[in-house]
Amino acid sequence: MSERTLHFGADYYPEYWPRERWEVDARLMRDAGMDIVRVGEFAWRVFEPEEGAYDFELFDAAIEVLGRYGIRVMLCTPTAAIPVWVQQRYPDVNVLDVSGRRRSWGARKNWCYSNPTMRRLSRSITDAMAQHYAGHPNVVAWQTDNEFSYSGCVCDHCAAAFRRWLATRYESPEALNRAWGLRFWSMDIHDFDEMMPPLERAHSPAHLLDYRRFQSDQVMAFNREQVETIKAADCAAKVTHNFMTTYSGIDYRELARDLDFVANDMYPRDITRLEDCAYGHDVIRGYNGGPGFWMNELQCGYINRENQLRTPPPGMIRLWTHQAISQGADAIIYFRWRSCTGGCEQFHSGVVQHDGDPVSRSYREIVAIGEEVQRLRSEGVAGSSIENSVAILRSFDVARAMELYYGGRLFDYDAELQRYYRPILRQNVGVDVVHPEDDLSRYRVVFAPLLMLTTPDQIEGLRRYVAEGGVLVTSYRLGAYDLHAVVPTETLPGDSLVELFGVRIHEYDCLMTDAPADPTPLVAWDGETYGTCVWADMLEPTTAEVLARYTNEWYAPFAAVTRNRVGAGQAIYVGAGLDEAFYAHLVPWIVAEAGVSPFLETPEGVVAKVRLVEGQPLCFLLNMTTQEQVVPLPREMHDVLRGCATPPELILSPRDVAVLR
């Protein structure tokens, strides 16, 4: 964003509330320190009551009222929810699912990205809005649609587009047959026109994976059309889309390429899992290419999904807010301003509740947070940097491949990554979550768990990183898939990865099954014995040294953890899923050996995060526990939120936050 300000606001739906209420809302927003609202993402029928007839009067009036109180808007294209006239005139725009059922009007995201009519309607409403609001002084940014997702559509339009997509990627049907291994079960094709979308649970994983890639590319094309349409009307417009953190239905890394900045939606739900929130923020910052992402929807109270969920205790919204800012957010927009009286989200809390009364605890808490946000604005947080020496690799291709075997899930990919993430977070060492093909040269340590699907380019990049002095850590199932989710014929992990990690694997054991088996393997390391789970690769060193061994049953002859020195660096292979205590021991040892130290020592459960403002550290201390914590400080600092010097020992109340300069 060109404007370097820390935005603070809420999602607002003026179309739902009486006009005489707008001024009351705008005044309450201003009093809470808000400067922005997101509007319009579900208002297609308001903007275009009938096809080709556009009406902007309601939003023009609402934006004018908001502007009088210093509230600017992020304007959304409204294509997430189709009006009934689309359904009645063009019923085939709706998704056709694998059971042959056509979805219908009445929900959202129920239409097909490949449908040419839907694409035309999307371009038309986007162009009309973009032309009308081009250069509007109160429109600070745009959002395309809302929460793009995998549609699962298998309609004729998708089938035809999928065949064209395959023809551009494979030289011939025979090349496709070879790449996917389609001689199995007589699935090979002689013409691209014979290929169909996957409809069966037991389809080839390669078929399922490429269909997901195809559908992801359809989303990219749909989004790109909207972005280009907006920018054709106003070349200075800043355009984003709201991601859903670790969602693997579409390739967010590719989607981000067409956006000016990335936005995210986060609903922590489980208030005890703040480490999951931290991981999600780091994932989103990776897609954004660094700090400056926006939180377009952040939970600000109870929410309803399958049922109504718990109300966050006092202090939790504040903790979520500062956690997001500490990890790179330059805008906090709560969902939503006011609880809605109807619809399937009618028991979804707002900043103010159904009665609109500002005495609600959520409003009073957010007023106090708004005062703190103003202090952070004064410190110049927006646009500040985050510099880390440790990275975790995360790939959408791996995430998708994990979800496609026999219609189930091979592994919980993000859970495997978080085995390594949690000890790094607790150590107060900053970590970036990046893609295997990103530039890794600035990192001293790179963790690459469950790197099951690899490409030659990725392997060469990892080899170069290690040879130049990096420390690379991987886990079980390394190299078990090629680009098409087909198992290679080389001995695992494949010749080039054997050279890098110095091990071969002829035996492995799945530890997730309930089938009778020998006792699960045990691993001895550094004087302790650890239990195992999920998976165990039986490592046979070629050039690697053994760091840990299995100790029982038939596993005993094999190595469990190895280290191979390549050039100036080292490649470590952790062959099994192990007890959490193992990672709490191993990960800090690896990080310290690489010369990376924490910014600040804190008690268990207190996390320190740093943003660099003009090169100087601004340290966020987050008490993620329900107990009072005492943090010894190495020197006197300035407490930005309290406006005073710090004592030698800083006392943090439960769920408390301090920002230190």
Image (spheres, rainbow, N blue to C red):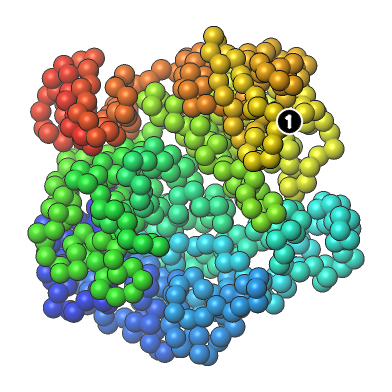
Question: What residue type is disc 1 on?
Answer: Tyr
Towards the viewer: 589 or 240:
589
Q: The residue tagged with tag 1: helix, strand or loop?
A: strand
The quadrant holding residue 224 is bottom right
* Image spot of residue 6 (x, y percent): 26, 47
Would residue 374 be visible to someone looking at this image? no
Towards the viewer: 226 or 158:
158
Residue lying at 65% horizontally and 24% vertically, measured from the top left: 521
User: What is the number of callouts on the image?
Assistant: 1
Q: In this view, does 358 lie above or below 394?
A: below
* Image spot of residue 523 (x, y percent): 61, 19
Would residue 40 be visible to someone looking at this image? yes
Residue lying at 48% horizontally and 18% vertically, measured from the top left: 585
| Left/right of residue 602 with respect to residue 407 in the rendered view | left
Give the labeled residue for mark 1: 508
**Label 1 crowd (10 A; few <14 / some 14-19 / many >=20):** some
Extreme residue toward the top, this view: 527
The quadrant holding residue 57 is bottom left
| Left/right of residue 426 with respect to residue 189 in the rendered view | left
* Image spot of residue 182 (x, y percent): 85, 56
* Image spot of residue 220 (x, y percent): 57, 61
In the rendered image, the quadrant that contains the C terminus is top left
Residue lying at 16% horizontally and 50% vertically, measured from the top left: 365
